Image (tube, helix red, strand yellow):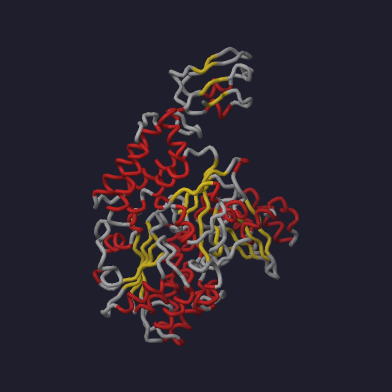
């Protein structure tokens, strides 16, 4: 029987996947083919996606499918002749988006049904934890993770084995294993995709971690804004409990572990492990002073270990295939693969998993297809609000912790926001500072007040009120905050500002000295004018102006009253002759 699989991650559903599924279900009243769902395969730019598998498991992938296509897809599947839907088949160029990747953390995403335990079991699911329980000691598990070189994928890149070993070595019978799924970076959605598309890999990875450190309780702290992820994880936990993979005496062994979900309120600061612990305990999410570290005194002041979703998603694969195989990928100081959320002014946006050691150019141009609309690449923001901007002349930077750190950016959790020539770098720095200033918990003065003062300066510059010395003032504030902030949020908040000043200082100087925005993005610093030599008097600009600032007779050159103009850009958007110029 042919099988039809609809990509039903959050991105697919937002693009209309549920409507496609419902329409296909209606067309399949006679149950002529198997109809099921899967998570996001990472090709978010092609959603909704429908995969068709024939009896020999050969795949035909249809993209940008609509509910209106359901009838002819069903007819094509029933007849076994897919030529009638060839216009929906993915192009070879787009298909290369996946074929150029190496997938470990995302190995099952977009392949299995995340709501069916049997699908996970068919891909060697829960074999790793069985192997661990009956063939390995906790110390051997930790040693295998050490051999792999797996580092925390949540941002800091701290050796996973070291954290596990510290928690195991801490005194006490009551210990906790915690998964940080509070994915707060703007433009990052790696953890969400893993939970939605492969929840059992997270559960199995956490079970192995719990066995290694001696924990009997595991907690997944996930933001409440991820309802589909929570729903599928809840179902997966229940399935695992019913099968005996979670709970008392797992696989008949002496090891017992229960798991629960904590839905967080979505505070960025709760990505910091001690703030997350405070939130878990029912308090406001604010970081604690360290030491003691969570491995010594974490959740309820008991030894605790925290890793993020992507880290745990690698664990079962490593234990089944061996740490050396994982370590064989990557660079000397950065082993394995890394998942990136590729967003912004990119042709093919989505999830990319590549071995460490590839370059930014490999990801942005070879896999991502370069910049939309034929524009020029300008910069990429790495590591979200805690990261930094990397300019075009550093495109061949190797992706590993050391090389990215040398640019002033960080690996972070994997956010990769691409910018083109029309992006104002001062505005971009302001965007990220606005985010971190709002997300500051307020516990320490440097972060609470320092980020607000920086935001005020950046706002003043983008509004045309910049003053001589503002750049130096920003730099002084940046270093003061980095030195004085209590946690990682404050210590890294200045990174976007420092890197934009470092690589795009001329844009800051143009905003301050010339009162101009080179990219034309800062509305306070631009004016719209109509070139009388290009204007044919079609009146389209005047009809689309929301405030009536444009006047002129039909077939005569029009003019813009700058005293009325609100600089919305509608005139430029609607002019087909390039007559509206932005200065």
**x and y, in percent, of residue 70 in the image:** 64, 53
Q: Quadrant of the N terminus?
A: bottom right
Front residue (pair 540, 484): 484
**x and y, in percent, of residue 271 in the image:** 36, 58
User: Compared to 29, does 570 lie above or below?
Assistant: above
At 40% from the left and 45% from the top, the residue drawn is 497
User: Compared to 211, does 396 lie above or below?
Assistant: above
At 51% from the left and 63% from the top, the residue drawn is 338
**x and y, in percent, of residue 382 in the image:** 47, 52
Using the rendered image of the protein, determine whether residue 533 is visible from the camera's viewpoint.
yes
Front residue (pair 231, 330): 330
Please state the total of marks drawn on the protein image. 0
291 sits to left or right of 381:
left
408 sits to left or right of 1:
left
Using the rendered image of the protein, determine whether residue 37 is visible from the camera's viewpoint.
no
User: Compared to 132, does 456 lie above or below?
Assistant: above
At 30% from the left and 53% from the top, the residue drawn is 483
């Amino acid at each position: 029987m042919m099988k039809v699989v609809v990509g039903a991650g959050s991105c697919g559903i937002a693009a209309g996947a549920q409507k496609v599924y419902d329409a296909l279900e209606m067309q399949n009243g006679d149950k002529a083919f198997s109809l099921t769902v899967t998570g996001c395969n990472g090709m978010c730019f092609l959603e909704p996606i429908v995969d068709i598998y024939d009896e020999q498991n050969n795949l035909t992938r249809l993209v940008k499918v609509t509910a209106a296509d359901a009838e002819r897809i069903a007819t094509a599947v029933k007849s076994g002749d897919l030529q009638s839907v060839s216009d929906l088949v993915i192009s070879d160029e787009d298909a290369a988006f996946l074929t150029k990747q190496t997938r470990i953390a995302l190995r099952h995403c977009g392949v299995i049904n995340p709501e069916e335990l049997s699908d996970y079991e068919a891909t060697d699911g829960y074999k790793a934890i069985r192997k661990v329980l009956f063939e390995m000691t906790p110390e051997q598990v930790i040693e295998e993770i050490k051999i792999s070189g797996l580092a925390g994928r949540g941002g800091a890149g701290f050796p996973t084995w070291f954290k596990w070993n510290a928690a195991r070595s801490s005194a006490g019978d009551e210990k906790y294993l915690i998964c940080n799924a509070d994915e707060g970076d703007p433009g990052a959605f790696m953890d969400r995709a893993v939970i939605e598309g492969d929840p059992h890999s997270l559960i199995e990875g956490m079970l192995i971690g719990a066995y290694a450190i001696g924990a009997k309780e595991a907690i997944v702290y996930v933001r409440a804004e991820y309802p589909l992820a929570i729903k599928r994880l809840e179902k997966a936990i229940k399935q695992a409990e019913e099968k005996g993979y979670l709970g008392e005496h797992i696989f008949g062994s002496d090891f017992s572990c229960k798991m629960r979900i904590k839905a967080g309120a979505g505070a960025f600061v709760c990505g910091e492990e001690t703030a997350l612990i405070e939130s878990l305990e029912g308090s406001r999410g604010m970081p604690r002073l360290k030491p003691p570290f969570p491995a010594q005194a974490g959740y309820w002041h008991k030894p605790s270990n925290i890793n993020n979703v992507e880290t745990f998603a690698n664990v079962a694969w490593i234990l089944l295939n061996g740490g050396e195989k994982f370590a064989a990928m990557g660079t000397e100081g950065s082993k394995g693969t890394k998942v990136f959320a590729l967003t912004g002014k990119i042709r093919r946006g989505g999830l990319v998993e590549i071995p460490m050691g590839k370059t930014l150019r490999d990801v942005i141009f070879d896999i991502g297809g370069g910049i939309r609309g034929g524009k020029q690449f300008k910069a990429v923001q790495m590591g979200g609000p805690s990261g930094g901007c990397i300019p075009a002349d550093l495109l061949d930077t190797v992706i590993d912790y050391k090389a990215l750190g040398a640019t002033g950016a960080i690996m972070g959790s994997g956010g990769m926001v691409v910018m083109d020539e029309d992006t104002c770098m001062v505005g971009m720095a302001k965007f990220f500072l606005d985010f971190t200033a709002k997300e500051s918990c307020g516990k320490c003065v440097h972060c609470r007040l320092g980020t607000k003062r920086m935001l005020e300066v950046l706002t003043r510059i983008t509004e045309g009120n910049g003053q001589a010395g503002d750049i130096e003032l920003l730099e002084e504030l940046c270093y003061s905050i980095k030195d004085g902030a209590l946690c990682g949020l404050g210590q890294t908040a200045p990174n976007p500002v420092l890197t934009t000043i470092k690589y795009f200082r001329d844009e800051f100087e143009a905003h301050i000295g010339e009162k101009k925005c080179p990219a034309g993005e800062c509305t306070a610093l631009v004016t719209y004018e109509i070139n009388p030599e290009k204007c044919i008097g079609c009146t389209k600009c005047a009809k689309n102006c929301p405030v009536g600032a444009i006047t002129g007779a039909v077939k005569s050159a029009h003019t813009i009253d700058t005293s009325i103009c609100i600089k919305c850009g509608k005139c430029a958007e609607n002019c087909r002759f390039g007559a509206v110029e932005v200065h």
